[in-house]
Image (spheres, helix red, strand yellow):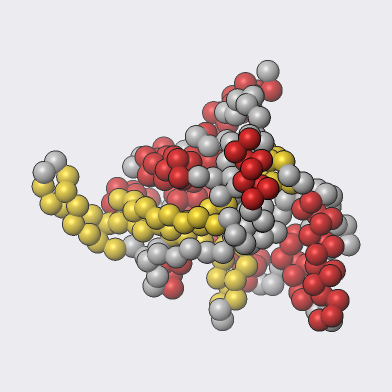
Amino acid sequence: MRDNKPLTTSWRRLAIATYAAPKDSRIYGTFDVDVTEVLKYIEAQRKAGNRLTITHFMAAALARTLYEDLPDVNCFVRRGHVVARRDANLFITINVGGGGMTGMILKRCQELSALEIGKLILSKSKEKRAGIEEGAFAARDKIANIPWPFRRPIFLFIKWWIFDMGLPFPFLKIPPDPFGSIMLTNIGTFGLQYGFPALFPIGRLPCVIAMGALTKKPVVIDNEIQIRDILPVGGTFDHRIMDGYQGGVLASGTIRRLQHPEELDQPNRQKSEAEKLSSDD
């Protein structure tokens, strides 16, 4: 639940004036998550006929952490001010084969269970791989086919119209905030452990989180060495919005929630609606 403190703080005013949009305001961080219990839960659910992956739980944990623990990070910079987002809308990248990448938005992701997230990803992935796109990705080819001398000026105008002015672009059907609150990508499918994805300048994202390949590592628990399943995570952050403290809150909140997969596999709507009503009072 967000309090009434102003989002455009003096520190952020200075950061906005100091840095340009994320080409020079990037900071990076990594953390590891013990997902042994999550994988056990996933295996049990698969035997019961429920298709779940670690990505579904990571998405639920990130969205709830952003919405509940870091509402002041669920925002973007527009014309020198920080603007709050109402919901935690998660952007998930998808590999459509042949090296092609696209993505999808999971709206109000803070309310969804891991199973609901999985069903949405499966349904939208089928559409994407069939070539059915919407929003910014539907406009991608149209913009790419503009002749080279005019492509960048037109792109910059579209960027100014949509992102700086906050207006829809009806001819291309691009919404004012097409990339959501935070991006999650799974680079572990390519065999990578850590990565620091680029902050897409027009994405207005405070951070991009990359999940690496799962590995087994020795961990000391109760003074005993145990072999656990570890998920490496890397992140790129916009320093105009986030600093080390907020990155730590994002990491600790995500790790804490992933230790209770059964809770992430339950809808979170009642809590979300209660917080909305409280913030409106």
The quadrant in which the C terminus is found is top right
Res 121 → quadrant: bottom right
Which residue sits furthest right?
171
Residue 13 or residue 192, whichever sits in front: 13
Point 84% across, 55% down: residue? 161
Q: Is residue 231 positioned above or below 267 on the image?
A: below
> Does 37 appear above or below 133?
above
- Which residue is drawn at the image coordinates 75% and 59% (left, top)? 135
Q: Position of residue 126 (x, y in %)?
A: 61, 66
The answer to whether residue 209 is visible is no
Question: Residue 117: image x %, image y %?
Answer: 54, 50
Image position of 242 (left or right of 55): right
Residue found at the very far top of the displayed protein:
281
* Residue 73 position within the rendered picture, expressed as x and y whole percent measured from the top left: 57, 41
Q: Nearer the viewer, residue 101 or 266?
A: 101
Tell me if residue 221 comes above or below residue 201 in the rendering.
above
Q: Residue at x 43, y 58 (%)?
A: 234
Q: Residue at x 56, y 64 (%)?
A: 198
Q: Nearer the viewer, residue 23 or 133?
A: 23
